[in-house]
Image (cartoon, helix red, strand yellow):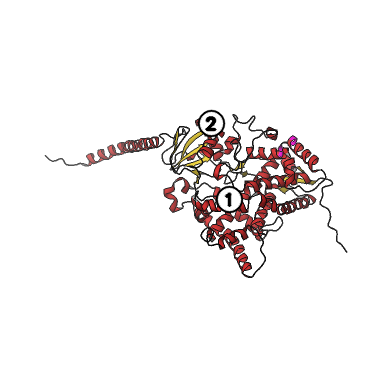
Amino acid sequence: MCCTCTPNCTTEAMVAMAVLAPWLAWLVISLLSLYLLNLLAHARSGLPPGPRPLPLIGSLHLLGDKPHRSLAHLAKIHGPLMSVRLGAVTTVVVSSPAMAREFLQRHDSVLATRSVPDATGKHAAGVAWLPPGPRWRALRKIMATELFAPHRLDALHHLRSDKVRVLTDHVARLAREGMAVNVGRVAFTTSLNLISRTIFSIDLTSLDDHGRSEDFQQVITAMMEGLGTPNVSDFFPVLAPADLQGMRRRLARIFARLHAVFDAEVDQRLRGRDAGQPRKNDYLDVLLDVAARDDGKDLLDRDTLRSQFTDLFAAGSDTSSSTVEWAMAELLRNPSSMAKVCDELAQVIGSRRNIEEADIVRLPYLQAVIKETFRLHPPAPLLLPRQPEMTVKIAGYTIPKGSRVFINVWAIGRDKDVWKEPEKFMPERFLGSAIDFKGVDFELLPFGAGRRICPGMALAIRMVHVMLASMLNQFNWSLPIELERNGIDMEDQFGLTLVKAVPLYAMATPIRGKEKEPFLRVV
C-alpha cells in the first residue's frame, strides 16, 4: 500500500524540521569548532605557552590598539617566552632579558631574517628588510664604513652642530614671541634636515617654512603611520593578494611621492657629474661611486637607492625626535631630575652657549636621563619582527620556521624582576651602572642586538644627546598654564615608532648670559 502525503503530514514535517534545524546547525558548528580547536591544539604542540586561540582570528582580539602593553600583560600570565596565534600566523613573544639573549645572541644566526610587512612592497630592497645574504652584507658594509663609522661621524660633526644651532635659534624666536614649543616637531624637523644634509647636502625641510618642506614632513609621517598600522594581510597571508585594507596601495602612493624627491636629487647629481661640477663628498656621492663600478651596478640600482634613503629617513627621524620629546616630558614631570641635569650642564658647560658632541662624555647625568628614557619609552617597543629560517628549539620549546618573533623591549624595560620601581622615572639607577644600550646588556635594547642591531645607532646617540642637551643648556623650560594645571598626558601611541599620543608643548625662557649674540652690521 502506498503512502500518500497529506497536507497535515507536510505541516508536521515542516514543524519538525523547524525545531531540528537550530539543533542540527548547533551540532555542525560544535563539531567544526571542536575539529578546528583540535587542529590548533595539535599545531601548538611543542610551542611556548600562550593564550588559547579562537577559531580563525586566534588571539587578535586580545591585542587592542597598544599591543606592546597587551602582550606584556599576557606575558605575566604565560611567561617570558610565549606563543600567540595572531590570525593565521604563529607569533612568538620574548619578554625577559634572559630570553632576549637566547634569541638575539645564542640563536641570532637562525633568527636574522626579517618578517616583512605586506605593505612595504618594493621598499623591502633596503638593509632594514633584506634577508641576510651577500647583498645585505654588502649594503650594510657600505653603510657601516661610509656613513656610520666613527671617523665619518667625526668628520661631519660640524654639520650636526649647525643643525642644532638652527633648532635653538628657532626656539629662541618662539620664546621672544611668547609661543609654546612643539618639542617633538622641532626635534623631528631637525632630525630630517640632519639626515638630508648627510645624504644630499641640502635641507629638505625647514622649521619656519610651510611649503614644500612641510609636504616632505607629512610624507615621512604618513609613511611611518602606514608602516605601523595593523594590516589584515600580515595576519592572514592567504588574503594578502586582495589587499583588503588597501594598505599596499596607500603605501605605494606614499612611497611614490617620497621616491620622486629622492629621484630628483639623484638625477640632479648625475647631471652635475656629467657637467664636471665639484663633488660634495656626501653619502649620495659615495653610493653613486659604488654604482659606477662594474661590481656595483647590480648592487645599487635605482630601487635599492630609494630603499636605502627611505630606511635612513624612517629610522633616523621619528625615533630620535620621539626620544627627545619623551625625555623632555619626563623631566618636566620630575622637577628634581630636571634640576640635576641642568646643574650638571651649568657646572660642565659653564657660560658657553653651544654644546659639542665631545662634551657628552662629561655629562653622566644627561646620559642617565637618555638611558632612562630608552628604558621607559623605547622607540621601537617590539623591535622589527624576525622570522626563523628553520625550525629551532629554544629553552625547550619549538620555534617554527616562518613564525613571527617579537622582542618586547617595552615589557623588558618595565619588568619588576629586573628594575627597582620600574614605573618610576629615575635616571639615578644608571649612575655607576655598566648597563648600556649598545646590544650587549639585554635589559636595555632600544636598538636591538645581534647582526640586526640598528646600524645607525652611533648617529642616533649623538643626535639625541646633543639636541636635548642644547635645549636644556640655553633655556629654562616650563609648562603652559593649562598643562601646569592638568598635567602632561603621557599616553603613548603604538606604531613603527612609539610616540606621544598628545604632542608635548612647553614654554622656553632663555637663560641669562646664553642668549644668541646680536648680529652686528659692519660698515
Could you tell me which secondary element the residue under label 1 belongs to?
Answer: helix
Between 479 and 523, the residue placed more toward the observer is 523
Task: Return the residue found at the far right.
Answer: 523
What residue sits 56% from the left and 37% below the top? 69
Q: What amino acid is labelled 2 in the image?
A: Lys
Q: In the rendered image, which quarter is residue 286 located in?
A: bottom right
Task: Return the residue found at the far bottom.
Answer: 275
Could you tell me which secondary element the residue under label 2 belongs to?
Answer: helix
Q: Is residue 271 depicted above or below 129 in this figure?
A: below
Task: Determine if the magenta segment contains residue 335.
Answer: yes
Task: Determine if the magenta segment contains residue 236.
Answer: no
Q: Position of residue 484 (x, y in %)?
A: 73, 40
Magenta extent: 331-336
Label 2 vs 1, first from the N-terminus: 2
Circle 1 Cα neighbour tier, 10 Å, few/some/many (<14 / 14–19 / ≥20): some
Between 240 and 14, the residue placed more toward the observer is 240
What residue sits 61% from the left and 52% below the top? 145
Q: Which mark is residue 224?
A: 1
Q: Residue beneath label 2, please?
A: 76
Q: Is residue 261 depicted above or below 105 in this figure?
A: below
Q: Position of residue 93 (x, y in %)?
A: 51, 37
Q: Is residue 212 depicted above or below 315 in this figure?
A: below
In the image, 252: left or right of 400? Answer: right
Q: Position of residue 255 (x, y in %)?
A: 55, 57
In the image, 206: left or right of 115? Answer: right
Task: Determine the main secondary structure of the stretch shown in magenta.
Answer: helix
Q: In the rendered image, which quarter is residue 269 located in?
A: bottom right
Q: Position of residue 97 (x, y in %)?
A: 56, 34
Task: Return the residue found at the far left.
Answer: 1
